[in-house]
Amino acid sequence: MNTPAYETLQLAVDARGVARLTLNRPDTHNALNATLIGELRRAVEWLGAAEGVRALVLTGAGKTFCAGGDLGWMRDNMTKSRAERVSESGDLALMLRALNDLPMPVIGRINGPAYGGGVGMISVCDMTIAVDTGVYSLTEVRLGLLPANIAPYVVARMGEANARRTFLTARRMGATEAQRLGLLSEVVAADQLDAAVERELADLLQCAPGAVAATKKLIAYVHSHDLDTNMIYAADKLADAWETEEGREGIAAFFGKRQPAWRQA
């Protein structure tokens, strides 16, 4: 599959339909600036429209996953008008939402530390596998700033009580604590990182891609609605699933004692 080229990203899709998106500013510890934010949004839009992409692995080049906002970019924003600063803040918010709303599962391959916006990038992943040497911190308040655009995703990930402690003190967390708080799904030694990601992918590739995409929407919906509304929505969506080609194929494959069409050996 031919993939777009970027200045601050590397994007590739393998024969299984697994995309790998790498933040590629290792000289700045993959810090987020206007170029990287814009390219991430365009890459996510491409992935969302590409046929046959079944999963995304998000990672960073070098020894750091993402150091958060680029301080040079932040300094430049101080000289801009309020309207310009609001616009750039909005660009970050739209990029995070685009990643969060991707129809395919996003696996965070967390290859090293993450700070500020980097923790936000972790929080929009569906599952996160990290090296055991990583350090994580919501550092914004130390700079007199707020973890604003990332807050909806980080709070959803670790809960309000844990967010209060980590946001308000900018405390540094090791990988074990970050896992306990729900930020990380699994913590492994660095030489086991790729194997752990492959185990996650092996499970995902057994699942029907359309059903996975619909289930991501289901999770988001039920999280933000009351029980009565969810009961109506869920009944409707299950009826829809029975009527899909995947639903018919899955049931037929089960009773025919064969593998469904989407399953990879």
Image: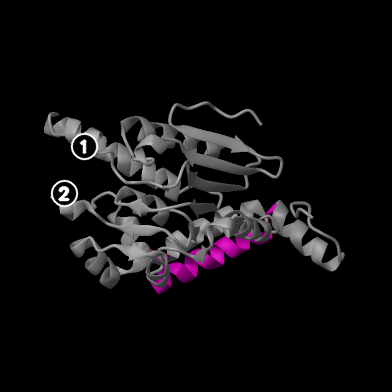
Q: Is residue 235 magenta?
A: yes
Viewport quadrant of the N terminus: top right
Residue denoted by label 2 = 143
Front residue of 112/52: it is 112
Q: Are marks 1 and 2 in contact (CB under 8 Å)?
A: yes
Q: Earlier in the sequence, mark 1 or mark 2?
A: 1
User: For residue 74, which numbered disc appears in the image?
Assistant: 1
Prevalent SS, magenta region: helix
Q: x and y percent of residue 228 in the render? A: 41, 72
Q: Is residue 148 shown to the viewer in this render?
A: yes
Q: Is residue 88 above or below residue 263?
A: above
User: For residue 121, which numbered disc appears in the image?
Assistant: none
Q: x and y percent of residue 130 in the render? A: 48, 59
Q: Amino acid at mark 2?
A: Leu
Q: Is residue 142 above or below residue 15?
A: below
Q: Which residues are magenta?
A: 223-244
Q: x and y percent of residue 103 in the render? A: 53, 49
